[in-house]
Image (tube, rainbow, N blue to C red):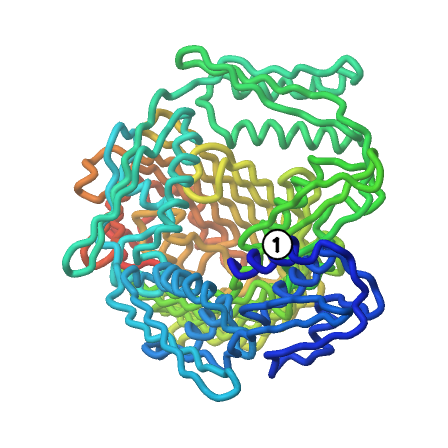
């Protein structure tokens, strides 16, 4: 580049007058033809060129990255160009990296490419880039030594000699400072993970400085969600030992915990204030709660919904948060913005994903009124597709003052995932394996296959989901599942294959409908010791059914919620069946933060299945309570009993009260504790009413204990039955070792 500026200097001072170029002579070029130089330099014979225009020729030629040095002189109508070409890279070779996929990924991101010019200052940039890439996968002390093999005709081979060194694993993650939350919960919040043997598939157990920066943002967001508005992550430190293990330490100052004392809406006089009175009830419900940006977002989302439902255009809003001591007032300003239209929407960054997939998620089209709220919601929808690492949009002025240009830039991310899990407990062992692709064929389609193995069942599933089928905004899913069950305590074995198709769409804010249709074949056999009534149920059964579900999700977050509720009602209606039955299920989960040390939850579950046309419900479809719904009882061993077989019932119901105590035990124990009270019952057998035990409500009380042991995460349940039937099999203690990763 220094030579470039020197050339311009001499051109400017040595050739001030304009002259017509009648002839072009080029020297020093062996790879780049005279005609190519003429085209790239934008040189026109017969045209008069001033010193300024010759400078532009020089700039154009340097921009090609073909030449290391260029000299121009215009004498007697002849433009003389003397060039020194950059060497050409024949091949780029990595020594010290056995993985083809890693090597290809690195080469793809380099500035220097094969069959292109070798520019020395780009080499140093690429060495830095290579080190950063290897640091991102745990090799923080990788060394890179470049070697250049020169050949005739100015051709080279570029060789990177790589010594990755040892991977820097995270041995321990600590938190110090003025904190209000247990370390275990904070470790669940951040991306970085301690290196444990059961996390061998995780990419976050090694030292990654990008993850550390993300960790800090996640910690701040989490503390703010608890009301600590002024929280600061003062520092983050990575201490690396001699054996290449690191200890991460985050220093946190939580600050004051703020409560919301007032929420109000300041509506501009040009708007109808009566439309916004409906927000007042929501404001009243949240006064007295601890401040949370999620709570503020919920208020703004409800406001946006109000604006959209009333088809209000060009409406904008802003939020003022007024602090007084440990109190905070939230004032939402609503006003009319400038009246502008969308002239054009441009999409960038999608090399794999079809542009139509991106545009289908946009709530605003070209020619529509410009609505910032709709664009922000569109960006949120794109992020929710889980196929982009980052989604940005930029607003620019259009061809006139009332028009806007919108640029949407997406960063595609790897969308393939592999997960596995294993565990062992008092009820037996289990294993799960899942492979999924979230952007199949660039169409935004999710393809997932899984295998689940437990002591009594083996199940394989294939699911294909289009989150935006035919750009309608609705989800369309196809699935196939095959499950083999061996239930010795229930007296039967079966193999059931099911295939179906369904859709899901948002009917109202956070309320979803999910209708579908499925066909299944159930090959059922019963044990020789079973009763005559059960033996009659053996055989093959075909079911064609319609199903639907209604779900409302108002939780503050999907993971470890501390406020809100999740409720769902679903029903299966037979269209054609060898033994027709209608099944209904309702579930409600509610969450409430009682104190900083107590998070309460209430859960209710009810299911019913009834035969039609005087048909008995076959044993493989009967209602039962899983162990998670009624603790203290052996799974499947509650309810009506036919001889020695637990046959389930037509109805099952359970309720649960639980208090999670995050600070009950010292952090050093790495243990969480929760207390529970469970109620449940399974009753009614259509083929024999004498087995009914509906008058006996089962109940239990106990404690859940989660411990991060050296062998892996373990969970224990200690329970005491308060009431039971004489036929029930109780279980006062259960444990499980294992996790999903």
Residue 563, x across and y down, in percent = 46, 32
Q: Residue furthest top?
A: 324
Q: Is residue 99 above or below residue 443?
A: below
Residue drawn 21% across and 44% down? 670
The answer to whether residue 576 is left or right of residue 300 is right
Q: Does residue 661 appear in this view?
A: no
Residue drawn at x 41%, y 19% as measured from the top left: 258
Quarter of image, res 249: top left
Residue 221: quadrant of the picture: top left
Locate residue 369: give its quadrant. top right
Binning the other alpha carbons within 10 Å of mark 1 as few (below 14), some (14 to 19) or many (20 upward) gives many
Residue 21 placement (x, y as % from top left): 79, 68
Nearer to me, 69 or 589:
69
Residue 359 against residue 224 in the figure, above or below: below
Image-based side of 663 in relation to 45, left or right: left
The picture places residue 122, in percent across and down from the top left corner, at 47, 64
**Farthest residue toward the left?**
242
Query: In the structure shown, which secondary structural element does the residue marked by tag 1 occupy?
Result: strand
Q: Quadrant of the C terminus?
A: bottom left
Which residue is more in the foreground, 267 or 582? Answer: 267
Res. 207 in view? yes
Give the farthest residue toward the bottom. 152
Spot occupied by residue 39 in the image (x, y as percentages of width and height): 74, 71
Q: In the rendered image, which residue does mark 1 sit on?
A: 410
Please state which of residues 517 and 325 is positioned toward the viewer in this rendering.
325
The residue drawn where x is 72% and y is 41% is: 396
């Amino acid at each position: 580049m220094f030579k470039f500026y020197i050339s311009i200097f001499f051109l400017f001072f040595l050739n001030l007058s304009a002259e017509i170029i009648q002839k072009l002579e080029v020297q020093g070029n062996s790879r780049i033809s005279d005609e190519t130089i003429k085209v790239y330099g934008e040189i026109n014979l017969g045209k008069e060129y001033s010193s300024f225009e010759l400078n532009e020729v020089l700039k154009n030629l340097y921009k090609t990255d073909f030449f290391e040095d260029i000299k121009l002189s215009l004498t007697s109508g002849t433009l003389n160009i003397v060039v020194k070409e950059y060497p050409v890279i024949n091949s780029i070779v990595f020594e010290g990296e056995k993985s083809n996929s890693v090597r290809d990924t690195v080469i793809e991101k380099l500035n220097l490419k094969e069959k292109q010019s070798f520019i020395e200052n780009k080499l140093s940039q690429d060495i830095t880039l290579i080190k950063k890439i290897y640091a991102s996968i745990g090799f923080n002390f990788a060394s890179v030594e470049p070697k250049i093999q020169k050949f005739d005709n100015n051709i080279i081979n570029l060789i990177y000699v790589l010594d990755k060194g040892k991977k820097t694993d995270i041995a321990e993650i600590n938190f110090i400072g003025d904190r209000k939350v247990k370390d275990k919960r904070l470790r669940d919040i951040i991306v970085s993970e301690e290196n444990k043997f059961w996390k061998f598939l995780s990419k976050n157990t090694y030292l990654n400085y990008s993850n550390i920066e993300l960790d800090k943002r996640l910690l701040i967001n989490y503390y703010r969600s608890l009301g600590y508005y002024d929280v600061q992550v003062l520092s983050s430190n990575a201490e690396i030992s001699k054996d290449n293990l690191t200890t991460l330490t985050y220093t946190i100052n939580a600050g004051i915990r703020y409560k919301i004392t007032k929420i109000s809406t300041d509506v501009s006089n040009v708007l109808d204030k009566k439309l916004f009175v409906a927000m007042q009830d929501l404001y009243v419900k949240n006064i007295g709660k601890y401040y949370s940006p999620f709570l503020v977002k919920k208020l703004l989302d409800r406001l946006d919904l109000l604006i959209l439902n009333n088809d209000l255009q060009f409406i904008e809003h802003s939020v003022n948060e007024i602090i007084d001591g440990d109190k905070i007032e939230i004032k939402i300003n609503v006003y009319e913005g400038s009246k502008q239209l969308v002239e054009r929407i441009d999409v960038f960054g999608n090399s794999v994903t079809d542009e139509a997939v991106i545009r289908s998620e946009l709530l605003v089209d070209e020619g529509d009124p410009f609505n910032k709220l709709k664009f922000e919601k569109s960006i949120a929808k794109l992020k929710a597709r889980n196929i982009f690492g980052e989604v940005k949009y930029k607003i620019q002025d259009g061809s006139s003052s009332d028009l806007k240009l919108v640029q949407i830039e997406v960063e595609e991310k790897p969308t393939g995932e592999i997960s596995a899990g294993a565990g062992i407990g008092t009820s037996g062992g289990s294993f799960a394996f899942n492979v999924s692709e979230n952007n199949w064929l660039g169409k935004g389609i999710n393809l997932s296959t899984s295998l689940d193995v437990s002591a009594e069942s083996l199940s394989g599933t294939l699911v294909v989901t289009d989150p935006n089928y035919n750009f309608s905004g609705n989800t369309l899913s196809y699935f196939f599942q095959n499950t083999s069950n061996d239930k010795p305590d229930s007296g039967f074995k079966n193999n059931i294959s099911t295939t179906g198709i369904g859709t899901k769409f948002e009917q109202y804010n956070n309320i979803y409908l999910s209708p579908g249709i499925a066909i299944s074949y159930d090959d059922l056999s019963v044990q020789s010791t079973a009763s005559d009534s059960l033996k009659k149920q053996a055989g093959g059964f075909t079911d064609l059914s319609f199903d639907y579900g209604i779900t409302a999700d108002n939780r503050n977050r999907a993971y470890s919620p501390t406020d809100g509720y999740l409720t769902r009602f679903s029903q299966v209606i037979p269209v054609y069946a060898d033994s027709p039955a209608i099944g209904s299920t309702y579930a409600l989960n509610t969450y409430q933060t009682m104190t900083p040390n107590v998070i309460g939850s209430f859960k209710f579950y009810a299911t019913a299945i009834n035969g039609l046309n005087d048909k008995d419900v076959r044993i493989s479809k009967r209602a039962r309570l899983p162990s998670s719904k009624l603790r203290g009882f052996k799974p499947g061993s509650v309810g009506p009993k036919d001889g020695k077989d637990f046959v389930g019932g037509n109805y099952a119901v359970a309720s649960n009260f639980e208090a999670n105590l995050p600070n009950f035990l010292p952090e050093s124990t790495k243990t969480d504790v929760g207390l529970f009270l469970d109620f449940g019952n399974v009753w009614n057998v259509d083929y024999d009413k004498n087995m009914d035990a509906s008058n006996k409500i089962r109940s239990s009380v106990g404690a859940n204990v989660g411990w991060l042991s050296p062998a892996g995460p373990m969970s224990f349940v200690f329970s005491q039955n308060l009431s039971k039937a004489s036929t029930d099999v109780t279980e006062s203690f259960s444990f499980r070792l294992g996790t999903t990763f």
